[in-house]
Image (spheres, grey):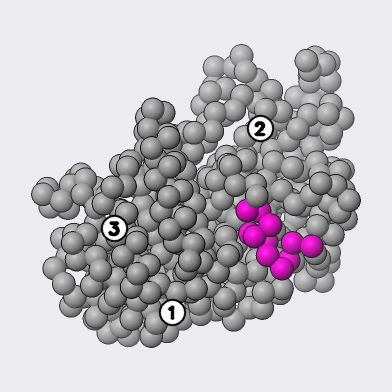
Amino acid sequence: MLDQSKLESYANRMRGHLVLPEDSNYDEVRSIWNGVIDRKPTLIAQCKGTADVISSVNFAREEGLEVSVRGGGHGVAGKSICSGLVIDLSHMNAVRVDSESKRVRVEGGAKLADMDHETQAFGLATTSGMVSVTGVAGLTLGGGIGYLGRSYGLGCDNLMGADVVTADGKVIQASETENSDLLWALRGGGGNFGIVTSFEFKLHEVGPEVMTAQLFYPIEQGKETLQMYRKVMDEAPDQLTINAMIIKTPPAAPFPEKYHGKPALALVGCYTGGIETGRRLMEPLDNFGQPMLKMVQPMPYKLLQSSFDAANPDGGRYYWKSQYLKSIPDDALDTLLDNSVEAPGPFTAIFLEPMGGAINRIGKTETAYPHRDASYNLGICAGWMEQGDDETCIRWTREIHNKMTPYSTGGVYSNYLSHDEEERIKAAFGENFNRLKEIKSKYDPHNFFSKNMNIKPVGTT
Ligand SMILES: Cc1cc2nc3c(=O)[nH]c(=O)nc-3n(C[C@H](O)[C@H](O)[C@H](O)COP(=O)(O)OP(=O)(O)OC[C@H]3O[C@@H](n4cnc5c(N)ncnc54)[C@H](O)[C@@H]3O)c2cc1C
């Protein structure tokens, strides 16, 4: 039971709102992207600035409440919602671009769309993810894989500074000259060290139009198309990034009706250099097979960033398993294609994200994100609507994931871990795990921030 007078005094210190179970918007505010996660917090603090975050951290610590931190609410594992106090930053989404120094400051609850919208006004961008409603915070803190990654490194590689509220309610800065160990940890070590109220990123000249490819093939052409894709990516310059996805054909125009709901192979990506060079590099895709739908054309970068938003609706039920792959030989492609035919759930996708380029030129221990030797990141992502289908969808995901482990590096992306994968956290941080434990002990010795891909302080188990 919360002490009413302390709660009142906390509410009075807030510029934002506190949402309690009896409030009419409680269910809306506690819901997150993954509908499998259904937790009922004691209290949700909708913060409007750093002062609110400090008050919330202090209140939770003094009252002994467990704490979770919500950025964009798109964490697959649903760690942003706990049963104690949710510190919700989703109203903190301001973005300020300094076009001269090519830097952007982004508040801790901004979505990728907020950041791209502001930076693209200057023809600038930094690496972010491929679904525009995802949060900048969670994505960056775990790594940040996107179309610009092979050109400019991951989101976390572009992180130059951060304002962080620590477990004792203090605000500290992390940069290459101040608390540089903390900056190192924030570049891939997740939400373990404090609450980031503001991120500073490096920007690059991108677009506003980039050369893009979006091709959709009937699954029967999958093998040859993936072999062609593999060759293109083997020879690709850094600026070319094409993802391969096995999806269900959306049941709507412009997809031909006879394919609606059937498995399809999609190749989607862009070239971040000149349009004409991009067009030439995309010719092998443009001229290949008989796609059911093909768009190989210049497009606003911002539009590309939101092309797959509708494929991942809020409140659907999701279960993901992923692993980094050394390579994708023919038998790996067969395994993916054979199993995709039976894929359950309308929003289920299998995707291959090419790594390499600038991502892999950074040393494994230069940042907390260690996966610098993988060729691809493979995601097996089941998405469905009915609770009654949970078991079938989760079983299918696990089975195909297990069949792909012979091709794995053994590493896994922390941002694609599901709620039941605690035992894989160590593999997510690889050779950096022990250093991260030490930095955790320095900045959060009592593991106040434990609702995340948790790294426990030294001396605790
Ligand atoms: C539809 C979809 C598409 C995706 N596409 C990509 C992609 O293209 N590339 C990619 O790399 N990833 C992608 N992801 C994975 C994504 O990076 C993670 O799900 C990430 O955690 C989302 O961040 P969030 O802020 O929205 O999540 P939240 O659920 O709000 O946060 C996740 C965790 O991050 C931490 N956290 C959040 N905000 C803060 C903060 N301000 N300070 C400190 N810690 C914080 C907390 O530990 C929290 O539990 C995708 C996810 C989804 C659901």
Determine the residue positioned at 61% across, 24% down.
40
User: In terms of secondary structure, where does tag 2 sit?
Assistant: loop
Q: Quadrant of the N terminus?
A: top right
Q: Amino acid at mark 1?
A: Gln
- Which image quadrant is residue 300 in? bottom left
Relative to 302, 163 lies left or right: right
Residue with the mark numbered 2: 82
Residue with the mark numbered 1: 239
Residue with the mark numbered 3: 338
> Can you tell me whether the CB of the residue at mark 3 lies under 8 Å from the nearest atom of ligand 1?
no
Determine the residue positioned at 73% across, 66% down.
432
Relative to 211, 376 lies left or right: right
Q: Any magenta on residue 266? A: no
User: Alpha-carbon distance for marks 3 and 1?
Assistant: 31 Å
Q: Nearer the viewer, residue 158 or 37?
A: 37
Q: Nearer the viewer, residue 168 or 106?
A: 168
- Which image quadrant is residue 293 in? bottom left
User: Alpha-carbon distance for marks 2 and 1?
Assistant: 40 Å
Q: Is residue 444 visible?
A: no
Q: Classify 10 Å Cα crowding around label 2: few (below 14), some (14-19), many (20 and above).
A: many
Query: Magenta part of the protein: which range?
Result: 424-434
- The overriding secondary structure of the stretch rendered in magenta is helix
**Numbered badge on residue 25:** none
